[in-house]
Amino acid sequence: MRIDILSIFPEMIRDAVGVGLLGKALENGLLDVHAHDIRDFATGRHRSVDDTPYGGGAGMLMQCGPIFDAVESLRPVNSLRRIVLLSPRGKRLDQAMVRDFAAEPDLVLLCARYEGVDERVSEALVTDEVSIGDYVLSGGELPALVLVEAISRMLPGVIGDWESVETDSFYEGLLGPPQYTRPETFRGRTVPEIVRSGNHAAIRRWKRKEALRTTLLRRPDLLETTARRHLNNEDYNMLAEIESEMPIGEKENQP
Ligand code: SAM
């Protein structure tokens, strides 16, 4: 998969993609990330890419010209299937969107700065607007990196053990279960006996039940939405068990 990222701070992208599993994925050719400087497409003496907004208001806006030219320099625009603008006004990113993007052969990510972009960029160029959450950052570079890293985990070969992806939070709409490593006892807290038992069927059931419990306690909304279509009869039985195990006060707070 190829991802082109347009930004006025391309070094932020280049510095960050070289490390960890993402860096390995690039090294192994499983993913190809190219960062481009939008300023290279500015025409004035000062290479400025922004101007004041029509109608007044605070701050500056990124102009259409350099952005259109930067995108058009990549490949013919009609051959670019998805051009994604990172924006707090976009659709909030979730795992289903990540999987959908990961299925594309290529993507263009557009990172804004200042107060954002001229609306005609969204109207005429952008296919998707993506937000990484209900808060405002100063630029789209970190959101673009969030998206790239999340996509990379969905690409075959990037994560050595696919089971670890399948048991990650949100894979089936649930939060992940608690996890433990050595030592067996740390400052008086001992790892639950069942995960040390070697009984794989019992461990699998325990992990599923604890994933359901964590989701019920922390994100009950997920059980009503994304997780719902992955739940089977055994899951519903376990949820009933979990509810019966809850102290009275906690039960009353459940939806
Ligand atoms: N005036 C814009 C608004 O109210 O929607 C905010 C502009 S913000 C200061 C500058 C840029 O940072 C945005 O255009 C976008 O590219 C990026 N950005 C900031 N917060 C973001 C978020 N939550 N998700 C995705 N991108 C974000």
Image (spheres, helix red, strand yellow):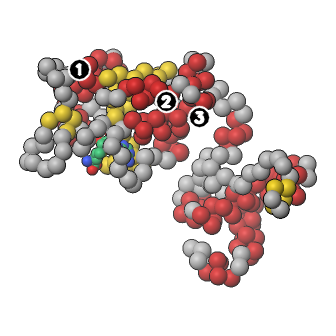
Circle 2 packing at 10 Å, graded few (<14), some (14-19), many (20+), is few
Tell me where residue 91 appears, x and y as whole percent. 38, 48
**Residue that badge 2 annotates:** 16
Image point (60%, 56%), residue name: 227
Between the C-alphas of marks 1 and 3, the distance is: 32 Å
- Which one is in front in this view, the residue at disc 2 or the one at disc 3? 2
Q: Is residue 195 above or below residue 52?
A: below
The three-letter code of the residue at mark 3 reads Arg
**Residue that badge 1 annotates:** 41
User: Does residue 237 appear to the left or right of 142 in the view shown?
Assistant: right
Tell me where residue 78 appears, x and y as whole percent. 31, 23
Image point (60%, 74%), residue name: 254
The three-letter code of the residue at mark 2 reads Ala
Tell me where residue 74 appears, x and y as whole percent. 33, 18
Q: Secondary structure at mark 1?
A: helix
Between the C-alphas of marks 1 and 2, the distance is: 23 Å
- Which one is in front in this view, the residue at disc 1 or the one at disc 2? 2
Q: Nearer the viewer, residue 66 or 130?
A: 66
Question: Is tag 1's residue or tag 2's residue first in the polypeptide sequence?
Answer: 2
**Residue that badge 3 annotates:** 153
Residue 6 visible in the picture:
yes
Tell me where residue 106 appears, x and y as whole percent. 44, 25
Name the image quarter holding residue 242.
bottom right
